[in-house]
Amino acid sequence: MVPVYSARRILVTGGAGFLGSHLCERLLAAGHEVLCVDNFYTGRRANVAHLLDDPRFELMRHDITFPLYVEVDQIYNLACPASPVHYQFDPVQTTKVSVHGAINMLGLAKRRKARILQASTSEVYGDPEVHPQSEDYRGNVNPIGPRACYDEGKRCAETLFFDYHRQHGLEIKVARIFNTYGPRMHPNDGRVVSNFVVQALLGRPLTVYGDGSQTRSFCYVDDLIEGLVRLMESPSDITGPINLGNPQEFTILELAELVRELTGSRSEIVFRPLPQDDPVRRCPDITRARTLLGWEPRTPLREGLERTIAWFDRLLAGREGERLAKEGMAS
Ligand code: NAD
Ligand code: UDP
């Protein structure tokens, strides 16, 4: 490989997860050294197994709610379960990883004078009353509901990032990520795209919560990673928050129908109760990302879904498929 003179040693927390593994890959391809830190709560060694032979890649098992002393030049803080099913399983731990984890990573960034990026979320807007959501909208979060551990945890992390920036002059970047999908989502992830694709491929009913009229805007993983890297590499006065997501909005029922069409599945669509505080509409205003980063998503939903379906198809053809068939997953 041609040497890259601006090569850095970059920490990716949550690097064995869905987004983190794609980010590690992307940073290695750009010539950097990557330290991937993960406690494998929702992430998997398999997601980064193909990187382990690269001498510039290091995998460390560590829970970021505990301090970490490593020598790095940049930090992407992604560690946190992202699916409602997983972040609500142990809500206290979710708040801890969001808040204590952020404090630990900010402390590390301060000691190392490292630039740090926070993977924040569209969930900071809660069930939004403003549409589409721009970054100056302050949100409508229920602070005592079942989603609060994640929403409020991420809001507090944003507060900490901006306080470290004002108080200690830290170089920060805050990305508000909207629903992202693609290969390496965990088949038991519980999020809507992986659920529908796995259900359709296994010939099981597609579980639409509520009447399916709620909307989401789905961003393909490669587009999202490009946005994260552009934000990290942007001039230091660009702190964010910046929305990163696809502004094309779909109802959940439209998504179910599209997945059925693309998989050629005969699965029926069944309706299940809508979870409490499930946001009714969600769609990013990405004017800031377009203007400041020259970024916008390129992959249409149909194309991204085709790639995602092909990946799950291969996964399910192997041992994972046998296991899921036995467990009756996603039914
Ligand atoms: P994911 O669950 O696949 O990845 C999260 C990773 O963090 C996993 O590898 C998990 O094992 C690890 N982790 C959890 N707790 C940890 C801890 N205490 N210490 C170390 N590692 C820990 O989820 P994802 O979709 O890849 O999300 C990554 C980040 O992006 C999260 O912070 C999430 O909040 C944010 N985000 C994702 C989306 C999305 O649609 N994918 C949307 C908004 C925000
Ligand atoms: N959803 C659904 N069926 C599923 C999983 C999710 O209808 O099997 C709905 C969920 O109620 C929500 C939307 O799909 O309205 C997106 O859910 P997801 O968990 O993917 O992410 P969220 O945006 O809610 O964090």
Image (cartoon, rainbow, N blue to C red):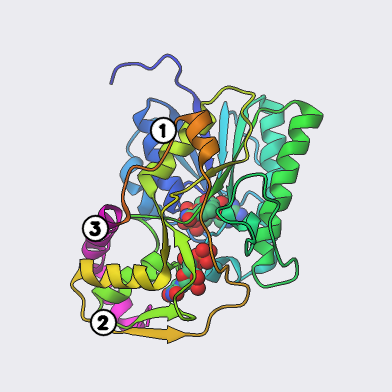
- Assess whether mark 2 and mark 1 are in contact (beta carbons under 8 angstroms): no
The disc placed on residue 267 is 2
The single residue placed furthest to the right in the displayed view is 167
Q: Secondary structure at mark 2?
A: loop
Q: Position of residue 45 (x, y in %)?
A: 40, 53
Q: Check disc 1 and report the residue beneath it.
A: 27
The residue positioned 39% from the left and 59% from the top of the image is 185
- The reply to whether the C-beta atoms of the residues labelled 3 and 2 are less than 8 Å apart is no
**Earlier along the polypeptide chain: callout 3 or callout 2?**
2
**Residue shown at 45% from the left, 67% from the top:** 191
x and y percentages locating residue 22 in the rendered image: 39, 44
Front-most of 321 and 247?
A: 247
Picture quadrant where residue 147 is located: bottom right
Q: CA distance from mark 3 to mark 1?
A: 25 Å
**Is 84 above or below relative to 96?**
below
Residue at the spot of label 3: 306
Type of amino acid at the residue the image marks with label 2: Ser
Tag shown at residue 99: none
Looking at the rendering, the stretch of residues picked out in magenta corresponds to 302-331
Question: Looking at numbered disc 3 in the image, what kind of residue is underneath it?
Answer: Glu
Between marks 3 and 2, how big is the CA–CA gap? 17 Å
| Residue at image coords 73%, 37% | 162
Q: Is residue 21 left or right of residue 38?
A: left
**Residue in the foreground of this view, choosing between 117 and 29:** 117
Image height of 160 relative to 6, above or below: below
What secondary structure is found at the residue carrying circle 1? helix
Quarter in which the N terminus is drawn: top left
- Element type at mark 3: helix
Q: Magenta stretch: residue 165 in it? A: no
Quick one: label 1, few (<14), some, or many (20+) residues within 10 Å?
Answer: many
